[in-house]
Amino acid sequence: MQIKTFKGGYDSNFAYLVYEQDQALLIDPSVPATEILNFCKENNLNLQSVVVMHSHHDHILGLREYQKLGIPIIAHRSIKLAVDKHVDESDQITFGKNTFTVMHTPGHRFDSLCLYNSRSKSLFTSDTLFVHGCGRVDFEGSNPNLMLDTLERIKRMPEDTTVYPGHDYGPTKTSTIEIEKRMNPFLKMTREEFLKQRLG
Ligand SMILES: [Zn+2]
């Protein structure tokens, strides 16, 4: 499985096109659809589906453009947008021989997902976990207590898992669970410290 990272959109967003042979899956549609579709065309890739990782405006670019081409949009079942397929915790999203396990990871937003591929030990975290940071929890649709539960879950993942975040906000583009457990202040705080720091 190969990963093509696109950076751009509204705020140094990362969109990830994962592909193998001629099959591709888009994780986090946060850059203009034309960029993704052009890359697919140039590389003879069939875009199987697009996974919305949460429904903030900078992460739902060009959904109608994909739908017009018959490419289904997948999102958590709590999303308030019209999508083609709902998923929930532990569901599998497949393309070619690859499988991603859906993790429902509320906190930053109620419909936030992470996707885990056990074969490549890759975790796509969108705005749940950044390199040395985490998503804001003071928005409508956020829940700081659920974010803490989500971060606890992420800490229990295999340490050699590579983390692919939704924005380029850290010193490196990707990280690992092992590095984040050592370097990410939000993974080391008590509940009280986290709530004080994040909500002031
Ligand atoms: Zn967000």
Image (spheres, helix red, strand yellow):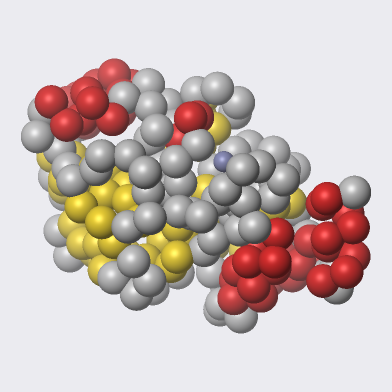
Q: Position of residue 135 (x, y in %)?
A: 66, 48
Q: Is residue 184 left or right of residue 136?
A: right
Please tell me in which quadrant of the rendered image residue 169 appears: top right
Residue at 40% from the left image edge and 33% from the top image edge: 60
- Count the marks: how many? 0
Residue at 90% from the left image edge and 58% from the top image edge: 196
Q: Is residue 5 left or right of residue 131?
A: left
Q: Position of residue 67 (x, y in %)?
A: 17, 31
| Image height of 176 relative to 23, above or below | below
Observer able to see residue 137: yes
Q: Nearer the viewer, residue 158 or 55?
A: 55
Please tell me in which quadrant of the rendered image residue 17 appears: top left
Q: Nearer the viewer, residue 32 or 106?
A: 106
Q: Is residue 172 left or right of residue 13?
A: right
| Image height of 90 relative to 134, above or below | below
Q: Position of residue 34 (x, y in %)?
A: 29, 19
Please tell me in which quadrant of the rendered image residue 78 appears: bottom left
Residue at 23% from the left image edge and 26% from the top image edge: 64
Q: Nearer the viewer, residue 27 or 190?
A: 190
